[in-house]
Amino acid sequence: MSEKLIVALDFSDLKEAEKIVKKISPLVKTFKIGKELFTSAGPKAVEMVHSHKSRVFLDLKFHDIPNTVASACEAATKMGVFMLNVHAAGGKNMMISAVQAVHKATANLKISPPKVLGVTVLTSLTDQDLKEVGISKKVKQQVEGLTVLAKNCGLDGVVASGQEISIIRKVAKKNFLIVTPGVRPIWAAHGDQKRIITPREAVEAGADFIVVGRPITQHPQPLVAAEKILKEIEG
Ligand code: C5P
């Protein structure tokens, strides 16, 4: 079960992030490095996690012209990350270029390719927000359509909120990863997360990985919090 838990290192200070990794890496195997830590610390953040024999989900949500995204994916692959992501709204050519770049880089380096995930619709966006940017579809339809596109482009999975797991599983039944953030154990504060789901509910609904940040990183005993979450998943 510990393979399923990804802890979000939402820090701007590398030392703070390392304190958490040191405390919980005996149990947790994967850490998410997002824009905050990567913009502050750069590739050193990835090296730090690797130095504790743990894996990195590089959550930089690439979205640009295909050539630029391919180069960014190649650079991430060379750092040896376990997972990375791109915006599915970047389109077919961009996603295909991302997957090709990852495979080309791993073939040269003789390492296994990182999982490439698509971000469908950010959970902060509503139907009205989509309308304002010229998308007439409802969020759910848009998530469904972008999931099919991401799968057809060869992506390994998507990042999806708890509410979207069932829609995604309907259109991508097998061999397609679902990584779910916005997860809150029953005992934890919700913070700014609104559409939350418990770790157990997420896994039961079909999530392959859950991403948890503050309930672990802000807990007085992060290892205890991680253990509690794993126990909750196992029931
Ligand atoms: O602290 P918390 O558990 O809320 O952290 C969740 C992590 O997952 C954060 O890094 C956040 O940016 C990310 N995330 C999210 N909801 C999404 C997508 C990503 O909370 N829909």
Image: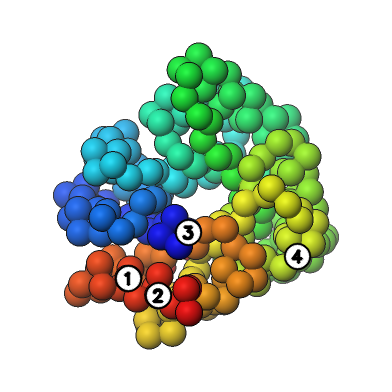
Q: Is residue 92 above or below residue 110?
A: below
Residue 4 badge:
3
Quarter holding the N terminus?
bottom left
Q: Tell me whether circle 2 and circle 1 mark residues in contact (CB < 8 Å).
A: yes
Disc 3 from disc 4: Cα separation: 20 Å
Callout count = 4
Reading the image, the residue beneath label 4 is 167
Q: Is residue 166 above or below residue 63?
A: below
Q: Mark 4 vs ligand 1: CB under 8 Å?
A: no
Q: Tell me whether circle 1 and circle 4 mark residues in contact (CB < 8 Å).
A: no
Residue 169 lies, in percent from the top left, at: 73, 61
Q: From the viewer's perspective, tell me whether residue 51 is left or right of residue 77.
A: left
Q: Is residue 214 above or below residue 24?
A: below
Q: Earlier in the sequence, mark 4 or mark 2?
A: 4
Reading the image, the residue beneath label 2 is 231
Q: Is label 4 or label 2 in front? A: 2
Given residues 92 and 48, the one toward you in this image is: 48
Q: Amino acid at mark 2?
A: Lys
Mark 3, residues whose alpha carbon is within 10 Å: few (<14), some, or many (≥20)? some
Q: Secondary structure at mark 2?
A: helix
Reading the image, the residue beneath label 1 is 227
Q: Is label 3 or label 4 in front? A: 3
Q: Earlier in the sequence, mark 1 or mark 4?
A: 4
